[in-house]
Image: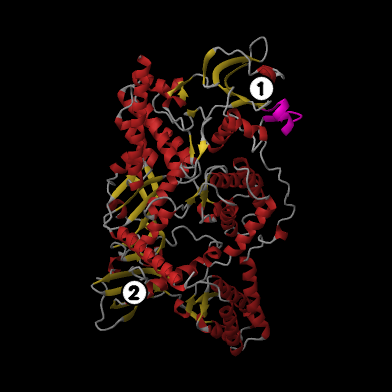
Amino acid sequence: MPLSWTWNLLAAGLFMGLIALLWVRSRAGRRPRAFVEVHPRYRLFLRRQGLTEARHFLDLSAAVISGHPGRSVARVALTNDDEAIYAFLKRESRISWLVRLAGSAAGAGFVSRSLREARTLEALQREGVGCPEWLAAGEDEHGRAFLLVRETPGATELRAWLRRETDPVERRRLARSLGAALAHMHAAGFTHPDLYSKHVLIGMGAECVQFLDWQRSRRHLAVDAHRRARDLAALHATLTDDLAAVRERLACLNAYCAGFAAANSSGLPRRAFLRLVLHYTRRLLRRRHIREKRQPSLARGVQEWTTLNEGELCIAPAFFAVWPRRSPQWLALDCQPKAPGQELTRRWLTTDGPPALLVRRRRRVTLTDLSLWGEPRASVEQRHAELLLRLQRHAVPAPRVLAMGRRVAQGRVESFVLTQPAAAAVRLTTWLARQTHRPDAVAWRRRVLREAGALLHRLHDATCYLDDANALAVQSSPGEEPIVLLTSAQRVEALRRPHTGRARRDKDAIQRALKAAGCSRSDQLRFLAGYRRSARENATDAVGPRRWPGYRTDESHVLQGDHAMSASPADSLWSRFFVGARRLRHRADWTTFVGADWPDCIMDVAVTDRFHAKQGRSTGRWILYADEREARRLSVYLKRHYHLPWWDRLLAALRWGGGRSPAFQEWEHLAWARQVGVPVPQAVAAAEYVGPWGRLRSVLAVEELHDMLPLHEAVPLAAAALAPADFRRWKRGLIVEMARLTRLLHDRCRFHKDLYLCHFYIARTDAAAANLMWRGRVFLIDLHRLGRHPWTWLWWRMKDLAQLLYSTEIIGIDPRDRLYFWQMYRGPGPRRRADRWLVRLVLFKWRRYRRHNARQKARGRR
């Protein structure tokens, strides 16, 4: 290709990329429309709290327990007369277009993190994956977003549960439950990039496992081995060896492999998958935030911040311990005294304990204060406070943060930080020089040297390095053991990644300082021994292959059901073309009712009860008894296919993949639907007859749903039996379950293709009962046309919804019910453009169904 053409193509690509970038920025730059989406179960409760608009949720006063630039998590308490709910409020102060673009790429739409997580939680609840319950989500007109998630009562963090529980039986039960829950999550198509140990909750029993923090989760049609291994590696890397033994980790992995293999037959062998998990574990342990999550959890409330003045003032819990009877409003930037002409001011404040240092900075806004996307960067004081909090999480004794604040107004940036350094602290070298004249303090001296080495390693583990070798100090009081601490965070430089050269330089500098202070070679070796001991304690020993002895390499983890499968003894290409062959599947007790020779006569047995035949197939009910006394009864529906298309007959004779008959296909569809949580009838037996001379016949026996009614009959009965208010509640619960089952299929690109109301069944007693919990009580039948269409999903989704809409033209269903189904099917959040187009397509297809059936009825009258 000529060079000019190359440059032209490159210029065209850059131009198209610029156009796409401008389009995305224009969408992100639009004034957002305020909205609030509330979970139907909590709509009345939140309305009584006065929480009806997005600003009401965003202005709730609560203690901030964690935060990132532009977003925070707070714990709130919502109390009513007879009910109290504790929840976590996730707030986003600004939503960049990159965040919305990431949500669109994940399939959640051009939305914020909060709404993306709300839609993910809704999908997880449909799938039955353990997760918290969302209460409300929304955005205001200023571009801020929120998500309110309910706190699970009685739940315990995984690490706290493992420290508390010592019973080996309960620990093994938890390992199996955790492995099964992870397998169910991956089988449903979800990945969790933040699957750390602190994001796993254990309920009242070891079987109740929940996962938190789904804002970066994505859903796939099939989760490959690398994504699954990466999720398990994140959990494995954040659990230290003292919390979970190797055998317990193996029990969890065995349960995971067994559960995932039962839902998905494809996958790596166990040993290869284990090597992949360990590979990702070693990669994750190179990251600082992963090593930080291996540290012991802080006490609850230590880093829970209280925000005031719309986020301009942040108060730490330690502030109220220092000034218990003083309001923090005196720290507001408008209330602090200003020194004219000075950019930086320092003031020491008296307290009941050690004095506190208030550092304030005031200067003009420059380009360095803004990020590439025009958002304000963190100030020097904010970075100083964040560094102290990081050191606190890594168990490094350092000055305490009491408060911090920041404000950008009128072209100026004002910020401050209030800290409390330790009292009576002297340099490490000075303290050691004083102890040389005290022979009774030899034990303390050795202990201080080892603690100094351990503290330096914890600093390096936090990717922090010293700018001054004299940054380490010792705090000692009469009669108490000395404590090694860090005098100031200003003598520490924080890096993004570990730096081996800086770590070696810090150790050499401190050894030189110790030698200058008169310490012997043995003292320097004690310092290095403390450093190495801390390194061994914080390293993981469970990532090497030698730590996994006796791991089973057999692949017998596929769960075997109670079904038997057999084929003809001479099942070859010759027999299928010229003699005939058959394949059988049946339940273990099937031969008790029909005898061992059932394959020879089942295609010719006379079935007259509820018999229906058309287009080369027939359906009828067959009642069987196990003995002459009729003590055991089995009622099945026989679906027999006598004439099939030539293409299926040819492929069945060639055995191209096998199972070409409708009976075997529906058998597989029923097994798959039951595996993913869709209530379906029980398949009892199936047979496929191939040949001779290109013939193909099949039969399927499905157990009857006893004492159940289709919805097109049950809804009019419920309308006549229930009071109007009870009937509305009855329909609302039923609609929620129908929408859940429909989305359960459509989210996996599986489509029923005959999704009429007559194919949904409920118990006859449920048609006259109010206040039901409908989950698992609605059955779906007739899955022989169920298909997976990942490329043409829009057409089949439109067809399913149009069929269901057409079949709802019965007594008891009004337009409000159809609208409510659409709201439950669509999920939380405002309507998207794709949703509006889908509605138009469904209505177009629905009108075509009505016209077609009107023509069929007119022909029937003639």
- Residue 530 vertical position relative to residue 94 in the rendered view, above or below: below
Q: Nearer the viewer, mark 2 or mark 1?
A: 1
Helix or strand or loop: what does disc 2 sit on? helix
Give the residue pinned by disc 1.
590
In the image, residue 802 lies at what x, y percent? Answer: 38, 33
Residue visible at 40% across and 63% down?
317
Q: CA distance from mark 2 to mark 1?
A: 76 Å
Q: Amino acid at mark 2?
A: Asp
Q: Is residue 142 left or right of residue 40?
A: left
Residue 734 lies left or right of residue 583; in this view the side is left
Q: Where does the image place residue 40, in percent across and percent down from the top left?
A: 35, 39
Percent of width and height locating residue 778: 47, 29
Which residue occupies the extreme top position in the image? Answer: 629
Magenta range is 563-584
Residue 475 visible in the snapshot: no
Above or below, 231 relative to 838:
below
Of residues 207 and 634, the one drawn nearer to the viewer in this rendering: 634
Amino acid under disc 1: Trp
Q: Is residue 308 left or right of residue 463?
A: left
| SS label for mark 1 | helix
> Where on the picture, by quarter, is residue 18?
bottom left
- Does label 2 or label 1 sit earlier along the sequence? 2
* Numbered-mark total: 2
**Residue 211 in sight:** yes
Report the residue marked by disc 2: 369
Q: Picture coordinates of residue 38 (x, y %)?
A: 34, 44
